[in-house]
Image: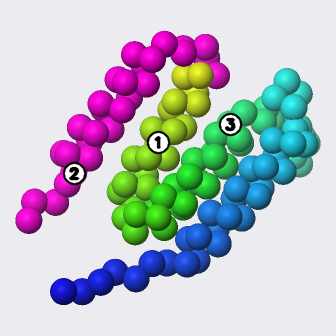
Amino acid sequence: MRRNRRNFLGLAVSLAFFGILIYFVLNFSPDKNFSVFNFSLPPLPAFFVLFFIAIYEFFTFLFNNQRRGFFISIFATLYLILRFNKLTHPFFAILILALFVTFELLFRRKR
């Protein structure tokens, strides 16, 4: 039986993106735009992208499986987007959870 080795580079990338995310949250207001190369950008899309990458890398390292890391990061990001849009009913979280459990069962390799 062959064991898959964990990629510690993924853990380092995850910690780096969590650090960038913390810096981003502490220094940028969601109400104000920030400018990059004479472009005015809202900080929310950048926050969600940073959050997605940090969660993806962390759970890919934790479970040693890219598919599960992807599903968990999409789940967490969608949940935060729903919370941001004030869709806080528990039924929405249950629906998203059921959707991703279904995806996991669909993409599971048959042995």
Would residue 83 appear left or right of 15 to someone viewing this image?
A: left
Q: Which residue in the structure is indicated by mark 3?
A: 45
- Decide: few, some or many residues near mark 2? Use Cα within 10 Å; few <14, some 14-19, many ≥20: few
- Decide: few, some or many residues near mark 1? Use Cα within 10 Å; few <14, some 14-19, many ≥20: some
Residue 53 lies, with reference to residue 45, above or below; the image says below
Q: Quadrant of residue 110?
A: bottom left
Task: Mark 3 or mark 2: name the one nearer the start of the chain.
Answer: 3
Q: Which residue in the structure is indicated by mark 2?
A: 107
Q: Is residue 49 magenta?
A: no
Indicate the secondary structure of the residue bearing disc 2: helix
Determine whether label 1 and label 3 are within 8 Å by CB: no
Measured as percent of width and height from the top left, residue 98 is found at 30, 30
Q: Which residues are magenta?
A: 84-111
Determine whether label 3 and label 2 are within 8 Å by CB: no
Measured as percent of width and height from the top left, residue 8 is found at 55, 78
Q: Which residue in the structure is indicated by mark 1?
A: 74
Q: Of helix, strand and loop, which mostly describes the magenta segment?
A: helix
- Decide: few, some or many residues near mark 3? Use Cα within 10 Å; few <14, some 14-19, many ≥20: few
